[in-house]
Image (spheres, grey):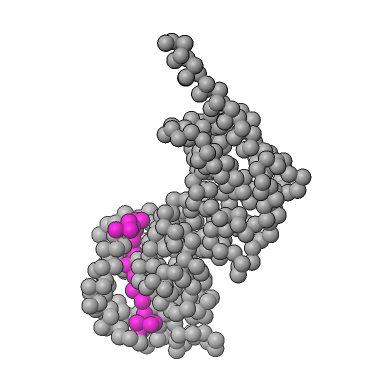
Amino acid sequence: MKTAKLKMVTPAAPIQATESARLYQRVREILESARSGVARTVNTTQVVANWLVGREIVEEEQNGSERADYGKKLVDSLSVMLTQNFGSGYSPQNLFYFKQFYLAYPSLLVATKILHAVRGKWPCPEPVVKLHAPRKESWTPGELHSNLSWTHYRTLLRVGDLQARAFYEIEVIKNNWTARELERQINSLLFVRLAKSKDKAGLMKLATKGQEIATTADVFKDPVVIEFLGLPESPRLVESDLEQALINNLQTFLLELGKGFAFVSRQERITLDGDHFYIDLVFYHAVLKCYVLIDLKVGKLTHGDLGQMQLYANYFDLERRTEGDNPTLGLILCTDKNDAVVKYLLGPELSKKIFTSRYKLHLPTEAELVTELKRETQALR
């Protein structure tokens, strides 16, 4: 009985070792070709190599043993061999990311000429990938783009919603975001904030074209997330401290405001018959061709705040606006507001010129944004 038992069990180890060796050889050829600098850029080389490694792992798992622990043992074994020959960067966790990358982007290389298509033809005498920077009209989310690094893709893997992920891919390319800026926009739920007031067609447009500024309402977000200031939510917070913190973090604030904003001045003074008024922040919007005035409030919005912003906008239209400028826009940032009061006080015309947004000193959750949307809808009804 002991002899029979040994005959049934012992072959498993050499079989698995052979499978790991074959997989390792294929992955090794991918990495060696990538290291030779045959792609257009270092970043693109790494992206392509990681995708191909992920594909090899997935296909090996699908064609291999059906045992539940097969995939983990396979990856662990591959990790050891790759680390010995290629150094760090091929831990089981990283190989898992490569696998997830392939599964999340199965069509990544569809629009790219791959010269190694048939397995077993490595190494290729020709470059692995012949890549040019895709034209805007030819590239679609989910395909390889030379401006998306592996760190970008690693960050995008965290976005489960396909429409949201496509939106962030487009925005990275349009705005040249770094991976860190992309992570911040994902953490601040930018897609959810822009999409919460969109209909089905509007959501599809976000996912296929990104954020487009067609009307003045497209410029502003609600809420505005300014967690990067590091300020605590406290009743002792004063507007001057909030303003100074925004100036100190102007670059990040501009990222939150969105594309097209250019800083002009702070505490802009206007004088009317001896009375002085001060506008907290003045910007110019390069796309809309108009001034954008921002007033900061640490409490709940009042009707007086709306009247004051209307005064500022009218003054700029009469005294600062020049030929080619469109009407001035005003934005009041506050901690809370009554949307019904805003609606009826501004009316249909002023609501195209004066805007109000809550600001958040912490990163909101999606549940918080949904709750806020429901509250706004009920108030407007």
* Residue at horizontal 26 percent and vertical 63 percent from the top: 371
Residue stretch rendered in magenta on the structure: 350-367
Q: Is residue 163 left or right of residue 303?
A: right
Quadrant hosting residue 270? bottom left
Residue 76 x, y percent position in the rendering: 51, 31
Residue 281 percent coordinates (x, y): 43, 71
At 47% from the left edge and 66% from the top edge, which residue is drawn?
207
Which of the two residues, 217 or 208, is positioned nearer the viewer here? 208
The part of the image, by quadrant, that contains residue 18 is top right
Please name the residue shown 55% across and 23% down the image.
14
Residue 39 appearing in the image? no
Q: Position of residue 351 (x, y in %)?
A: 34, 82
Residue reaching furthest right? 125
Among the 4 quarters of the image, the one containing residue 220? bottom left
Q: Is residue 353 magenta?
A: yes
Q: Is residue 111 above or below residue 34?
A: below
- Seen from the viewer's position, the closer of residues 64 and 183 is 64
Which residue is pictured at 42% across the width and 11% down the height?
1
- The one nearer the camera, 70 or 336, is 70
- Tell how many labels: 0
- Any part of residue 131 in sight: yes
> For residue 303: magenta?
no
Q: Position of residue 323 (x, y in %)?
A: 55, 88
Q: Report the quarter where the C terminus lies.
A: bottom left
